[in-house]
Image (cartoon, grey):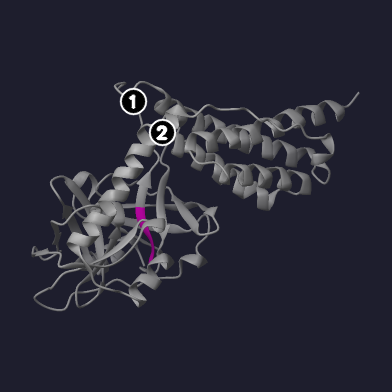
């Protein structure tokens, strides 16, 4: 389908969501009786949630059908005056880097039903329980919870976040649509008051941790020293590719980290900079733990991921991955000196 075809066919099933006094996001209908999918962070901690449908109608959300904090997803229920058009879920496990995607949302809460096109930049395994789709289709605040379509007009993702730091250009993230399937298949009724209480407590805890606890952590550097045999099985080109990937990750992640290291009243302070840095480093490590030709390098990345997983704060996790990177760069330099032609 062309982008025009997808927009025409899908827009009637896409909604605008307003939660509380200032939250605006996007959602889409997954059941004709009035079940709507969106991001959890769009409605988190709120009891006053409104859904505006394509035909101009407005509905108050009656209850929450399901929510999944680990994947930032939620299903909400409204009581429409008539059966609603729905969107079809595709198989997000079938997507790969280079696939064309279309996003539709309400950027900034102002430009309703805006369309952007791009590619799957990377399918990024973050952990055993979470994979993220990195996309080049531009999204903005207000687009959160909107559908991400494949070329067949099927929803293969839910647009979720952007990485907005110095050196990071057009890095947008979506949650794979397959994570919605168990929520849709096994809905339940959660009263709005109970939902708001439970998720507000978590939101307050997360905000407190991200804004203060990381700053109190003392970092102890543990850069591993590898033998040059860690590169056995890799060619010079392989070594160069791994080192470049590490350098690119540091070039993007370090500025994100530095934004949280600044004073909280600085104009570019970012309370989530440590996490953003860690996620960038983690994605690179996960990729090369699987794809590096030499077993020693795969093991080195795996050891770094295990160490990061044992730590509590994103500040510690980011430095654990940086130690992993620095250890591999140092041994790559020693390897290169030993392989210089006379």
Q: CA distance from mark 1 to mark 2?
A: 20 Å
For this view, does 23 lie left or right of residue 221?
left
Camera-nearest residue between 114 and 257: 257
> Mostly what secondary structure, the magenta segment?
strand
Dots 1 and 2: beta carbons under 8 Å? no
Range drawn in magenta: 155-159
**Residue identifier under label 2:** 213
**Residue identifier under label 1:** 268
Q: Residue at x 54, y 54 (%)?
A: 127
Q: Residue at x 33, y 25 (%)?
A: 268
Q: Earlier in the sequence, mark 1 or mark 2?
A: 2
User: Nearer the viewer's eye, disc 1 or disc 2?
Assistant: 2
Q: Quadrant of residue 8?
A: bottom left
Return the x and y of residue 95 as percentages of the image width and height. Answer: 50, 63
Q: Secondary structure at mark 1?
A: loop
Q: Is residue 17 at least partly visible in the picture?
A: yes
Q: Residue furthest right?
A: 342
Say above or below: 25 vs 261: below
Camera-nearest residue between 208 and 93: 208
Return the x and y of residue 315 as percentages of the image width and height. Answer: 49, 33
Quadrant holding the N terminus: bottom left
How packed mark 2 is, by other alpha carbons closer than 10 Å (few <14, some 14-19, many 20 or more), is: some
Return the x and y of residue 85 as percentages of the image width and height. Answer: 21, 74
Q: Residue at x 60, y 33 (%)?
A: 322
For this view, does 264 lie left or right of residue 273?
left
């Amino acid at each position: 389908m062309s982008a025009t075809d997808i927009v025409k066919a899908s827009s009637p099933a896409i909604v605008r969501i307003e939660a509380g006094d200032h939250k605006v996001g996007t959602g889409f209908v997954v059941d004709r009786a009035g079940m709507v999918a969106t991001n959890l962070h769009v409605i988190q901690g709120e009891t006053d949630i409104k859904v505006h449908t394509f035909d101009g109608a407005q509905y108050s959300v009656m209850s929450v059908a399901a929510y999944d904090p680990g994947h930032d997803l939620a299903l909400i229920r409204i009581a429409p005056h008539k059966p609603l058009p729905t969107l079809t879920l595709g198989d997000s496990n079938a997507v790969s880097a280079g696939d064309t995607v279309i996003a539709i949302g309400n950027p900034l809460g102002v430009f309703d039903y805006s369309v952007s096109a791009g590619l799957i930049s990377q399918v990024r395994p973050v952990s055993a329980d979470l994979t993220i789709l990195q996309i080049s289709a531009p999204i903005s605040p207000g687009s959160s919870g909107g559908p991400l379509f494949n070329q067949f007009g099927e929803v293969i993702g839910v647009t979720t976040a952007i990485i907005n730091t110095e050196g990071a250009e057009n890095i947008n993230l979506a949650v794979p649509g397959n994570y919605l399937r168990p929520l849709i298949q096994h809905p339940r009724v959660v009263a709005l008051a109970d939902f708001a209480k439970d998720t507000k407590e978590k939101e307050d805890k997360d905000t407190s941790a991200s804004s203060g606890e990381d700053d109190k952590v003392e970092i102890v550097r543990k850069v591993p020293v590898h033998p040059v045999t860690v590169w056995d099985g890799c060619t010079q080109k392989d070594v160069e590719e791994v080192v470049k990937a590490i350098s690119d990750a540091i070039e993007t992640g370090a500025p994100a980290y530095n934004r949280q290291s600044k004073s909280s009243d600085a104009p570019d302070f970012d309370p989530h900079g440590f996490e953003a840095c860690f996620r960038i480093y983690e994605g690179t490590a996960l990729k090369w733990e699987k794809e590096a030709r030499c077993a020693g390098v795969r093991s080195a990345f795996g050891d770094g991921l295990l160490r990061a997983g044992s730590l509590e704060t994103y500040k510690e996790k980011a430095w654990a991955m940086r130690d992993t990177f620095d250890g591999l760069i140092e041994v790559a330099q020693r390897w290169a000196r030993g392989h210089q032609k006379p």
